[in-house]
Image (tube, grey):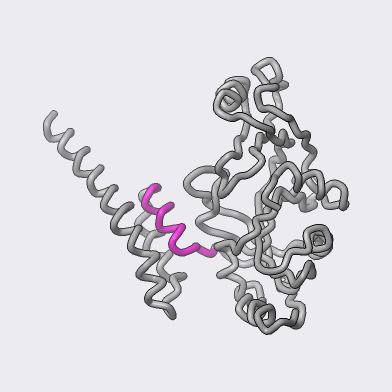
């Protein structure tokens, strides 16, 4: 589950839809001459929140990236569809609670975690989750990253993140309760299967991730709107998550603004 390379091979053998890919023993096997004019992905064996994932859009990109990484890589077709994720609770390989969403406003890079999500319904995701559970026998909370193939509309699985993902806080909007599913696990049973509503939901701003995005993009209204989704029923959590926003990002932005102001005045 931690290995992008092993996961791709296992998923292919278990009939789980994934983008076409090949494993290269060394990234150095690729060079500028291997650029064929079509974008593709290069992924290190183990990555986290987009680190070690590269979109290759030109020969220059290929040359630069291959000069930075060593070891085996996954060369995967680039699917130009919307990227999404499914938060799920497995009980010894059996999916018991899940919902899906599109990733919006990825921060701080295009392949990092989202700062906002749009809840969606995927008719084919339950079958995929069943196969993933059979393959991994996962027990607990995890997230499945996928892309919607624009040519077929089908869901293509990108990877499994064996940890709770930030988007699961919006599960209530999709008609599922992760607290109830987790309580079932802790009680030693699987509980009733919770399937999501067959409907879309408007943009949901993740706290505190969307605060960081709003500061970088200089969007004060978005900064204020994000506080509506803060976990106000847990003041200690709000305080701990807010501390870095104010002590690092806001103060850093203020210092940069002051430096820029001094430069303009000195001119």
Residue 129 place in picture, x, y as percent: 78, 62
**The quadrant where residue 76 appears:** top right
The reply, left or right, for residue 266 in relation to residue 252 is left
Identity of the residue drawn at 38% across and 48% down: 216
Q: Nearer the viewer, residue 47 or 261?
A: 47
From this view, report whether residue 180 is shown above or below residue 103.
Answer: below
Residue 173 visible in this rendered orientation of the protein: yes
Q: Quadrant of residue 264?
A: top left
Q: Is residue 205 magenta?
A: yes
Res. 220 image quadrant:
bottom left
Identified at 84% across, 46% down, the residue is 12
Q: How far from the left and from the top, in percent, is residue 161?
A: 65, 56
Count numbered badges in the picture.
0
The image quadrant where one finds the C terminus is: top left
On the image, the x and y values in percent for residue 141 come to: 65, 67
Question: Can you give x and y, in whole percent of width and height, for residue 266 in the image?
Answer: 11, 31
Camera-nearest residue between 221 and 50: 50
Name the residue located 57 percent from the left edge and 59 percent from the top edge: 117
> What is the span of residues highlighted in magenta in the rendered image?
204-217
- The residue that appears at 57% across and 23% down in the rendered structure is 67
* Residue that extends furthest to the top in the rendered view of this protein: 33
Q: Is residue 106 left or right of residue 129?
A: left
Outermost residue, left direction? Answer: 266
Let me know if residue 98 appears in the view: no
**Does residue 77 belong to the magenta stretch?**
no
Instruction: Say above or below: 2 vs 62.
Output: below
> In this view of the protein, which residue sits in the foreground, 211 or 201?
211
Q: Examine the rendered structure and indicate whether residue 136 appears above or below residue 111.
A: below
């Amino acid at each position: 589950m931690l290995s992008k390379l092993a996961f791709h091979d296992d998923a292919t053998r278990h009939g789980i839809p994934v983008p076409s890919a090949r494993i290269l023993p060394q990234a150095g096997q690729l060079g500028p001459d291997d650029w064929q004019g079509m974008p593709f992905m290069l992924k290190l064996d183990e990555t986290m929140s987009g680190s070690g994932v590269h979109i290759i859009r030109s020969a220059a990109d290929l040359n630069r990236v291959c000069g930075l990484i060593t070891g085996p890589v996954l060369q995967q077709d680039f699917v130009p569809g919307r990227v999404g994720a499914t938060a799920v609770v497995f009980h010894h390989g059996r999916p018991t609670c899940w919902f899906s969403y599109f990733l919006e406003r990825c921060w701080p890079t295009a392949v990092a975690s989202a700062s906002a999500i749009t809840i969606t319904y995927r008719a084919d995701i339950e079958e995929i989750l069943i196969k993933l559970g059979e393959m991994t026998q996962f027990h607990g909370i995890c997230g499945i990253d996928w892309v919607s193939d624009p040519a077929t509309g089908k869901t293509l699985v990108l990877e499994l993140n064996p940890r709770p993902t930030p988007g699961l806080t919006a599960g209530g909007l999709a008609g599922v309760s992760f607290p109830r599913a987790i309580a079932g696990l802790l009680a030693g049973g699987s509980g009733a299967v919770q399937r999501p509503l067959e409907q879309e939901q408007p943009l949901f701003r993740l706290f505190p991730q969307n605060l960081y995005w709003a500061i970088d993009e200089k969007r004060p209204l978005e900064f204020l709107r994000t506080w509506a989704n803060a976990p106000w029923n847990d003041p200690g959590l709000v305080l701990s998550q807010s501390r870095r926003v104010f002590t690092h990002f806001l103060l850093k932005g203020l210092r940069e603004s002051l430096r820029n102001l001094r430069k303009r005045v000195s001119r």
